Amino acid sequence: MNAIDAAFQRLREEGRTALIPFLTIGDPDLDTSVDIIKTLEEAGADMVELGVPYSDPLADGPVIQRASERALSNGRVTLADVVHVAENARQAGVKLPFILFSYYNPILQYGLDRFFELVTAKGISGLIIPDLPIEEDVELRAMAEAVDIHLIPLVAPTSNDRVKRIASKARGFVYCVSSLGVTGVRSDFHAGIDEFLSTVRGATSTPIAVGFGISSREQVERFGKQADGVIVGSAIVRKIEEVVQLLQAAETKRQGLDQIRAFVQELRG
Ligand SMILES: O=P(O)(O)OC[C@@H](O)[C@@H](O)c1c[nH]c2ccccc12
């Protein structure tokens, strides 16, 4: 059974909402990313989005844009580097399901066949490609499912029939974007978010998770009432940014990781 499906089944039995952090791999370096993933698991995360840093992150706000710049300032961070971080985290004992997050271009450049050879049997259970439109995802979705990886679709609070078409085919979970626009911490969400989530819920039996703008325990609780998971990226990436100097020095790395753990534990409650 795919590890994402197993995780949501366990969470349903426990009556809990999945906490799904996102981090940019290579920020501030590849080895520290392994330490941060371990810390996220210790803090109670249920699965994690491993972000491939990209030079043109169109859907990202300033926090994640800066994280990509930090990661890429040490030189290239390739898809293979990110998969290698996933393997190292597994070897370090991390059990979390991994969701590889990449814009489409790096995958296209790498080549679809070569990409799926790279990610097969490396502990990757999900794939999110925010700029791959559903009209173009048939081939890639089939290639992913053939190696037991779920291509996780994003739906935004726009036209209902498109939402239903996407949600009805979804595997893993449906990524419900809470607001139009780019990633980044928010205090208010799309006006029709509750109806939007009900529409998605009604269109599929696949779990649904909400992302974009979530940064506090109360927001996690609010969305936990309607969704099976909550995704938190920028708020965690901002915490990484705040402690990045501590993370980069051996004698203070633990202190930096402890601050990240405390923040995520607070989110989880
Ligand atoms: O950063 P936020 O507002 O918490 O949103 C999650 C987001 O970081 C993560 O899922 C993500 C990072 N980059 C993206 C680009 C598009 C869609 C989603 C994403």
Image (cartoon, rainbow, N blue to C red):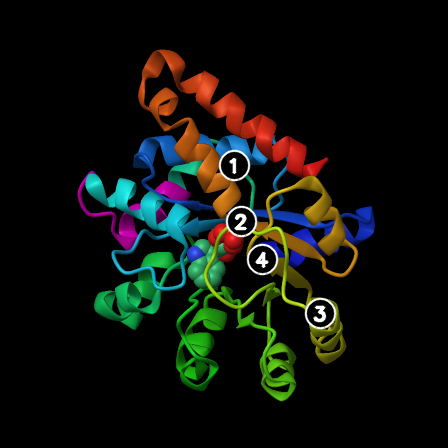
Mark 4, secondary structure of its residue:
strand
Q: Which residue is mark 3?
A: 197
Residue 185 is marked as 2
- Asked whether the residues under the numbered discs 1 and 3 touch, taking CB atoms below 8 Å apart as contact, a structural biologist would say no
Q: Earlier in the sequence, mark 2 or mark 4?
A: 2
Q: Disc 1 and disc 3: Cα gap in Å? A: 31 Å
* Ligand 1 is within 8 Å of the C-beta of the residue at disc 4: yes
Residue 54 is marked as none
Residue furthest out toward the left: 75
Q: Residue visible at 74% across and 67% down? A: 194
| Residue 47 against residue 245 in the figure, above or below | below
Which span is picked out in magenta? 74-86
Instruction: Assess whether residue 203 is covered by the magenta stretch.
Output: no
Mark 2, secondary structure of its residue:
loop
Q: Which residue is mark 4?
A: 211
Q: Residues within 10 Å of mark 4 (few under 14, many from 20)?
A: many
Q: Disc 3 and disc 2: Cα gap in Å? A: 19 Å
Q: Residue visible at 29% across and 71% down? A: 113
Q: What secondary structure predominates along the stretch shown in magenta?
A: helix
Q: Disc 4 and disc 1: Cα gap in Å? A: 23 Å
| Residue 177 against residue 141 in the figure, above or below | above
Q: Is residue 13 left or right of residue 91?
A: right
Q: Residue visible at 51% across and 65% down? A: 148
Q: Earlier in the sequence, mark 3 or mark 2?
A: 2
- The amino acid sitting under disc 4 is Gly
Q: Which quarter of the image is occupied by the C terminus?
A: top right
* Ligand 1 is within 8 Å of the C-beta of the residue at disc 2: yes
